[in-house]
Each structure stands twice: as structure tokens, then as C-alpha cells.
Amino acid sequence: DAKTTQPTSMDCAEGRAANLPCNHSTISGNEYVYWYRQIHSQGPQYIIHGLKNNETNEMASLIITEDRKSSTLILPHATLRDTAVYYCIVRSHSGSARQLTFGSGTQLTVLP
Amino acid sequence: GAGVSQSPRYKVAKRGQDVALRCDPISGHVSLFWYQQALGQGPEFLTYFQNEAQLDKSGLPSDRFFAERPEGSVSTLKIQRTQQEDSAVYLCASSVREGIGGYTFGSGTRLTVV
């Protein structure tokens, strides 16, 4: 699976949009972009995934650039409960490997 | 149940002791994963089951680590002769379909070896 690069940490004001970037310049054509987050003392939580089209669900929006070399996770109205480590992961849905490969993620702190 | 359940939530073991960590995945979920998460790091893959078959154990750090899922539901991760470097959070995840979509993680078992 392709490697991802994320900023180590970010702050966001409560009620504002949080935009978390991720670079995945070596992504291949059949690899999806996944986002998970991990709140302190909990297991990772799935947020969203996409291939090349932008995606939106009740938690967040995922914007993938046309060349697919980077993406942005958007939390439209961040709350204090969104403080967590956010992981951007690239993986294929085919092939023998099924596991997620986590990097170090971005520590998002939502400030009151 | 509604989510992935792991027990115990915390485990303190003396060095050299054997431990067994349990994972109850969501009913009907085919895929089951074990991860190890050291303090301040992202989770690292240990092993993967599809039903009762262990298809990938490439992440197990040594032969002291053993995992099983005999009936394709509950899984147990066993660590023999625990050492201090085994101290970590052990996470279990399951998925209804192999390889596609998001995985549901449990809250993990925090193992401390003293």
C-alpha cells in the first residue's frame, strides 16, 4: 500500500471547519483513501473512504484531488469531541493484503 | 452485540507469565484482525482471520504470540512468557466483508508487563 504523509498536529476552533490534509503521491489506480480517527483510550473509528470522487457522510467530507496525490478530510463544524488522532490510510480492495497500515496520524485539538 | 468487545480491558502480568486476550467481534463479521499499539504510536498489524482460517500472521513479532478463532467468531490472542516490550494496547477489529469498507475496532486491552 502507498505511504501517506500528514502533519503531526493541528488546532481548530470549536464550531469552525477542520481541514485535515494528507499526501499520498505514490497512490496507485486501484487504491482507496481511508480515514480513521482515534479518540484517547478508544479504538480507531472508521470515518470515510473514497477512490476518486468526493464523498460525504454524516461525519465528514472527503475531497480527493484530480490527480489523486492528495486529499483533505473536512469536519464541517468541529466540536470538542472531535479532538482525536486522525489517520489517513491508502489501501487496495483487491490482492491478498487485508490489513490497514497506520502511520503516525494528525493530532487534531479542537479548542473552546 | 452492537460493537466489538474485548476483555479484559486492562491486564497486568508479571514478566514470564502467559496471558490470553479475548475478542468478541460483531456477529456475522467474516474478517477479524489483531493489532498492537505501543504508547504514542499508530496501531501495527499482527494477524488476520477470515472466518476460522488464519490467512496472515506476518505481523506476529515472535513465536511467543499465538492467535486462534476456532469457530469463526470469538478470537483469542495468547502471549507466552511475556516480556516488558510486550506492554501495549492490543486492538481487535472486525468487518462484515473481506477487504472492503471500514473496520469496526474494539476499545482494546491494555497489557502492562512488570
Image (tube, rainbow, N blue to C red):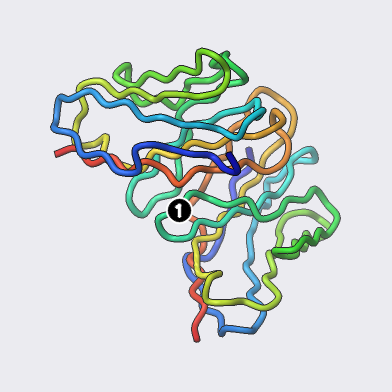
Residue drawn at x 30%, y 24% as measured from the top left: B79
Q: Secondary structure at mark 1?
A: loop
Q: How many marks?
A: 1
A79 vs A64, left or right, is: left
Q: Residue at x 72, y 30 (%)?
A: B97
Q: Is residue B86 above or below residue B3?
A: above
Within the image, what quadrant is residue A60 found in? bottom right
Q: Quadrant of the N terminus of chain A?
A: top right
Q: Chain of mark 1?
A: A
* Residue A59 picture quarter: bottom right
Residue A31 spot, x, y in % from top left: 74, 41
Q: Residue at x 48, y 20 (%)?
A: B57
A99 shown above or below A108: above
Q: Position of residue B93 (x, y in %)?
A: 54, 37
Q: Which residue is tagged 1?
A: A42
Residue type marked 1:
Gln
Q: Is residue A67 left or right of residue A11?
A: right
Q: Is B55 left, or right, of B83 in this rendering?
A: right
In front here: B70 or B60? B70
Badge 1 crowding class, 10 Å Cα cut-off, few under 14, some 14 to 19, many 20 or more, is some
The answer to whether B93 is drawn above or below residue A11 in the figure is above
Residue B92 to residue B62: above or below: below
Residue ranking furthest to the front: B1
Q: Is residue B111 left or right of residue A52?
A: left
Pick whichever, A89 or B37, lies toward us.
B37
- x and y percent of residue B86 in the render? 27, 34
Q: Residue drawn 28% across and 40% down?
A: B111
Q: Splitting the image into 4 quarters, where does residue A37 fall?
A: bottom right
Percent position of residue A108, x then y: 51, 70
